[in-house]
Image (cartoon, rainbow, N blue to C red):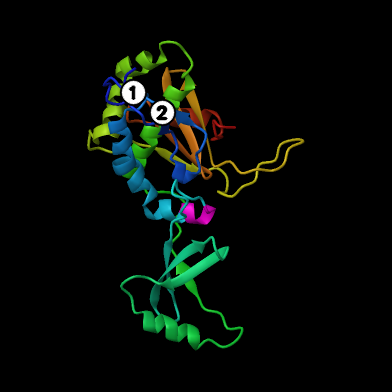
Amino acid sequence: MRCIFCKTLSDECVSVEHIVPESLGNKEHVLPKGWVCDSCNNYFAREVEGPFLESLYGRTSRFGMAVANKRNRIPSVTGFHAQSKTKVDLLYSRKDNGLLIGCANGHDESAWVTSIKSMKPGERGTLYMLTPDTPDISRTTSRFIGKIALEVLAYSGIDVPGWNCEIVDKAELDELRGYVRTGQPKSLWPVHMRRIYPAEFLFAEDGQDSHQVLHEWKILRIPDSEYYVIVAIFGIEYTINLGGPELDGYHKWMRENDSRSPLY
């Protein structure tokens, strides 16, 4: 077996690869050992997944959905308390089953404490938070989605004999492979982003209890033999072209299909 990213022999590797990171709620969809080598696995955690998860959108979306990472921690977020003009940190307390709010590191705690103590019974304060609805259009986002897309493709035929060699030897995937693994080329690989349902949306099927969908995906083949991976995470749909840094074919498909989501 060889790694689908760096193409090195990976039979001795011990790491499984979560297609969508555990920190976004994925416990189920995993590539077995060897599909992504230990070196690439560690690199992605540090240089591709980490920057996305720790971005403003990454932290606030995980906080809002109360999704813990693999260490069972929900990230804190920073807000601004209007009355004391102080930055504050908000974090979940599993012990108290609620939110804890305190002065952010490096800021004047006395102003925050004085403001809270001076509040009259029933009086309310004002807290502002930056909560972006979608991630930035950036290399951080596109490399993250590119990594997921290549792993979705691998996962789609994981039980097919010879599929590992098919993915590794597919020259059409080398440009995206290099972009995800080494950051080359430096230009932005485009990703189409839009929200298709609220992050906390509850799906209901006939005869079943309602449930949330943290992530889902599909591979879309259009008539010009282009292949796009469509991934939805927390209700945001991301579309990326596996074969090259352009979205013209997808935009044409959207126009011909009334801009509906390929997922539905």
Q: Which residues are magenta?
A: 61-66
160 or 16, nearer to the observer? 16
* Residue 146 placement: quadrant: top left
State the residue at coordinates (71%, 36%). Answer: 205
Circle 1 sits in a helix, a strand or a loop, which is it? Answer: loop
Measured from the top left, where is residue 64 in percent x and y?
A: 51, 56
| Tag 2 near tag 1, CB within 8 Å | yes
State the residue at coordinates (56%, 88%). Answer: 120
Instruction: Bin the neighbour count of mark 1 within 10 Å (Cα to Cα): few under 14, some 14-19, many 20 and up.
Output: many
**Marks 2 and 1, how far apart at CA:** 8 Å
Specify the label residue 103 is tagged with: none
Specify the label residue 151 is tagged with: 2
Measured from the top left, where is residue 194 in percent x and y?
A: 48, 43
In the image, is 197 to the left or to the right of 242?
right
Measured from the top left, where is residue 233 in percent x and y?
A: 50, 41
Decide: is 240 above or below 105. above
State the residue at coordinates (46%, 66%). Answer: 90
Specify the label residue 4 is tagged with: 1
47 or 92, nearer to the observer? 92
